[in-house]
Image (spheres, coloured by chain):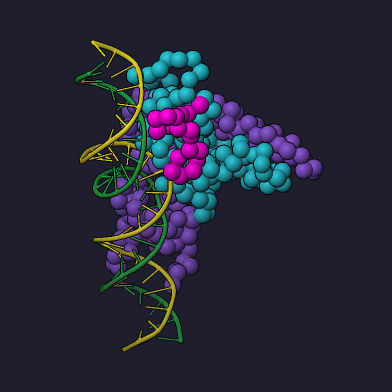
Chain colours: A purple, B cyan, C green, D yellow
Amino acid sequence: MRPPVENAALRIGQLADATGVTAETIRYYEREGVLPAPARGSSKYRQYVANDVERVAFVRTTRALGFTLAEVRALLSLADAPNRPCVEVDAMARANLAQVEEKLRHLEAMRAELSRVIGLCAGDGMVVECKILQALGDHPRRQDVSSA
Amino acid sequence: MRPPVENAALRIGQLADATGVTAETIRYYEREGVLPAPARGSSKYRQYVANDVERVAFVRTTRALGFTLAEVRALLSLADAPNRPCVEVDAMARANLAQVEEKLRHLEAMRAELSRVIGLCAGDGMVVECKILQALGDHPRRQDVSSA
DNA sequence: CTTAATCCTTAAAGTAACTACAAGGTCAAC
DNA sequence: GTTGACCTTGTAGTTACTTTAAGGATTAAG
């Protein structure tokens, strides 16, 4: 079963439970290089540490925001920055910031329109017109969605 | 070639050019029911209208924000709301608003940390510590990323 | 009128990011 | 000393596309 020992290394299932993903996904992340290969004990079980929980959670959150695994890898290399020259880090941060700000603009437009619709629907059964399509009226033009 | 006639129906390639996706993706969206099957003329070519440009752009933008095609379908049904009862529309809008607001929180945390890093890097070659991992320190717990 | 470009259809195969399953090895407990 | 929960590797399926292919129709241009 689960060793409830304080400060002990996490096994894959425990990391999975802590982050809400499956063990398979964690192994997949390792294969794809977004998670470092963890230590293995006398048994061949993977031994994770607290920081890995943060890392997996970060991958989940950024993926949910529409970033590709490749983009997540790049963002993680920012987190692992100490080894990288400042100019590179700055360039990457700037590029990602631009993308983040565009996503923010679109999400704010969605929030505004959804709030408006919710306001219109208050109480009575009146017919509502949702202009969410027009609210996002910004034609992306080959701005890659990638991922899929 | 392309008819430059004013107010003419768009052919699939023109809609593709206007939205930055391929014709194949547009046919795929039709198969998956996020785009209505358009009118066909005497020839069997699909005839699109201006509104379809908006619709495809909307699909792209929402996909880029990490929504699944199924979620996009739901959001589009809000846009096509007139036929649906207000209570339903309200419930859907509320559910989606909650999701949008969570994405906004995460993106704002990312923006803050990216801005901070960019500030630190100004000019000199000093080493920067990026705490983007900790900035998104919100463990999602089975909050579906789905899509893939 | 011919011809090149663009379109139509169906179908199948490839990619990204998982998700699920299969067959077997490990480990603490009873 | 075996049960059962957990681990291992590996393969196959799913979603949301992208790419390629084969064969036929349409249309703008020369």
Q: Is residue A49 visible?
A: yes
Q: Is residue A113 left or right of residue A73?
A: right
Question: Which residue is drawn at the image coordinates 49% and 56% (left, top)?
Answer: A20
Nearer-the-camera pick, A20 or B35: B35
Nearer-the-camera pick, A34 or A90: A34
Q: Is residue A57 above or below residue B43?
A: below
Nearer-the-camera pick, B56 or B9: B9
Give the quadrant of the N terminus of chain A.
Answer: bottom left
Q: Residue B42 lies in magenta, yes or no?
A: yes
Q: Position of residue B11 (x, y in %)?
A: 41, 26
Q: Position of residue D3 (x, y in %)?
A: 40, 84
State the extent of the magenta-drawn residues as a range.
B30-49
Q: Position of residue A75 (x, y in %)?
A: 40, 36
Nearer-the-camera pick, C9 or B97: C9
Q: Is residue C13 above or below residue A41?
A: above
Q: How many marks?
A: 0
Give the quadrant of the C terminus of chain A.
Answer: top left
